Amino acid sequence: MRIAPTDVDAARRQLERVLASSGFVRNERMSRFLRFLAEQHLEGNDGQLKESVIAIEVFGRRPDHDPSQDSIVRTEAGRLRARLAEYYVGDGMGDAVIIRLPKGGYAPSFELRDPSAQQTLGKQTHWRLWLTAAGVAIALAIAGIVWLRKTELLWRNPIEGGQFQSVTDFDGTEQAAAISRDGKFVAFLSDRDGHTDVWVTQPGSGQFHNLTHGSAQELVNPSVRALGFSPDGAWVTFWTRKPPNGSGQIGVWAVPTLGGQPKPYLEDAAEFDWSHDGSRLTYHTPGAGDPLFVSDGALHAHGPPIFTAPAGLHAHFPVWAPDDGFIYFVRGVLPDKLDIWRIQPAGGQPERITAHNGHVSHPVLLNRRTLMYLANDPDGAGPWLYSIDVERRIPHRLTFGPDRYTSLAATADGKLLVVTRASPRRSLWRMRIGDSRTEISAPTRIALTPATAFSARLGPGYLICVSAAATGESIWKQANGTDTELWSGHGAHIIGSPAISPDGGHIAFSVHQGSETLLYVMQADGSNKRVVADSLELQGSPAWNPDGRSVMSAANDHGVPHLFQVPIDRGPPTVFVRDYSVDPAWEPYGRFVVYSGPDIGATFSVKAVTPEGIPHPLLRLTTLTRGARHVKFLLGGRALAFLRGGIDHKDLWLADPETGAERRLTTLADDFDIRDFDISADGREVILERVQERSDIVLLDLARR
């Protein structure tokens, strides 16, 4: 119910209440936006609430602003809607008046939470004249109970009092833990024997059995639930990817829990889950949009999908609700713009459950209402264990401390959980390349002042990298043996990697701080820092145009990333590529730009386009494996460097952009996993970012609380 037009004062009081809340008081731009919309609406000027007017009056755009080229108003409106929603499930949960910004326009609405709240806005409260004292007491008691339930002060941590028990304590990496429905067996991936294999154990037995013995070439995929069990626990199932020239590249295989030969279980599928009564099977294939199917239990029956994600989005981790009334799944853009949704087994419109828009994975249900999952916190740290009541939908972080969690699974009754607890280490390494290109030195570790360093880039005579601390991330520079901090921000998370201008004199980098994403430019010595774009929801790493006068970066527009040109003189950003496009790399002479397309299955496409928007052919180099999108041109554009291999282990390759000829540059040890690289323009120096996953499997017993 909308409030009466005469209650303008009450509407303004509610506006001030919202603007004074923690989500708005520190965000001047969003507060200015909301105040402008509200005041214009309350003064009867809805006709002025047009995108072009708002861009000029609120965001300082020029009178010739073109909304088709600069989406700042639409982007900020989406953020404002999300921030208002957060307010009304937090500080404003008990407010009588709700401010909404309906989609499709910019005129806000002021609505009563329910009809009975109308009385709180009037000058008279006649009901008090006849309500008896006993009635008041009853009403207050009921209101108190409702308030407690709405604010979740009665919420209980679902793992409070649970007992943790280590399942593994090996050197190396254990990951992707799964547990049988009855809790008798735990399966996991481990490199204990020098190669990643499927292992199984009975908790508490101290005995571990390798089930695959190197027979599966690729098993690691953190973006899906890689391991599982058949409903009776007789088989351990695992995701695998065959060599590119094999048929049916991605599929689910199975091996007897007590040992035996692996065999195909669900071919051409990436993930699956059996209903609790064992009569139905849900699974998704690795095709575009991860089509989600439900069958009557047949392992190879394909009817029409009940859901397919829009282009560029994914739908992973399907899991049945305990009553089999819903299928929950993770939907969004990999790797860190994801949330949990649910859909009925018959299909229909999916329903969003969480609103993290972050790294979300591994949902499990302990009962009909208690959902646990893994997610990063708003600052990008984690992942941690989270829980949410699927009806109230207020997320709660359950774990704190230095360890992060990379997998989560549960028994059928939700009494036993198994998690992968990880303490990853990232480090930077250097390799030298001789004149013959076959003379390559062994990697040597780079000593740096910050304890954690990643996302390194090479400039003329210097190296820059990103470092993470508890208070936020920063950018460091190493030159002539001296380390210098160039930039830092409290609570800041640097998006992608910094970019060095062609002449080496400037650095561009994207930052997520608070509710904003900002594109900065500074000189290579850290001076003259300035924001050149604040209206885009930035994604991936930026890249300098060859002329050094603008920076290209991907930005989300209605959930799909596009490449934008951003002049460094503070001109408005303009769309460059309207298809799904991230992580650009310019050919040194500006003839074309290479960029990444959407993930499909475990790979993503590589494309190129000229400055005129004409597709430029890339011979052979058309797809790469998920996990490392960075590509780098060598001086003169004669070679393009990239990473190729499995999801967890890759090597550095070079390709000739004109002929398509490729050459492998490194042959790294199996335990030397790299997530990023850079190579000098002359091809003589390589920087590798190594990730060492130190992790163990832990059992959490909730039945003994």
Image (cartoon, rainbow, N blue to C red):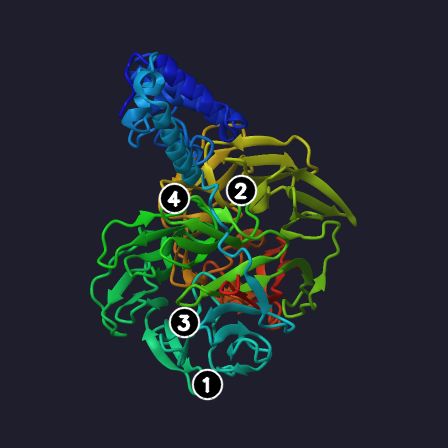
Q: Report, in whole angstroms, how far the alpha carbon at label 3 lies from the one at label 2.
A: 57 Å
Which residue type carries mark 1? Leu
Q: On the rendered structure, is 210 left or right of 251?
A: right
User: Viewer-nearest of labels 4 and 2?
Assistant: 4
Q: Report, in whole angstroms, how far the alpha carbon at label 4 lies from the one at label 2.
A: 51 Å
Q: Which badge, 4 or 3, is on the more N-terminal residue?
A: 3
Question: Which residue is at the far bottom?
Answer: 260
Q: Residue, x 25% and y 49% (percent of image)?
A: 349
Residue 323: x %, y % from top left = 30, 60
Q: Report, in whole angstroms, how far the alpha carbon at label 2 lies from the one at label 1.
A: 59 Å
Q: Report, in whole angstroms, how far the alpha carbon at label 3 lies from the one at label 1.
A: 16 Å
Q: Quadrant of the N terminus?
A: top left
Q: Which residue is mark 4?
A: 392
Q: Residue, x 63% and y 67% (percent of image)?
A: 437
Q: Residues within 10 Å of mark 2 (few under 14, many from 20)?
A: some
Q: Which residue is mark 1?
A: 258
Marking on residue 395: none
Marking on residue 181: 3
Q: Which badge, 3 or 1, is on the more N-terminal residue?
A: 3
Q: Secondary structure at mark 3?
A: loop
Which residue type carries mark 4? Arg
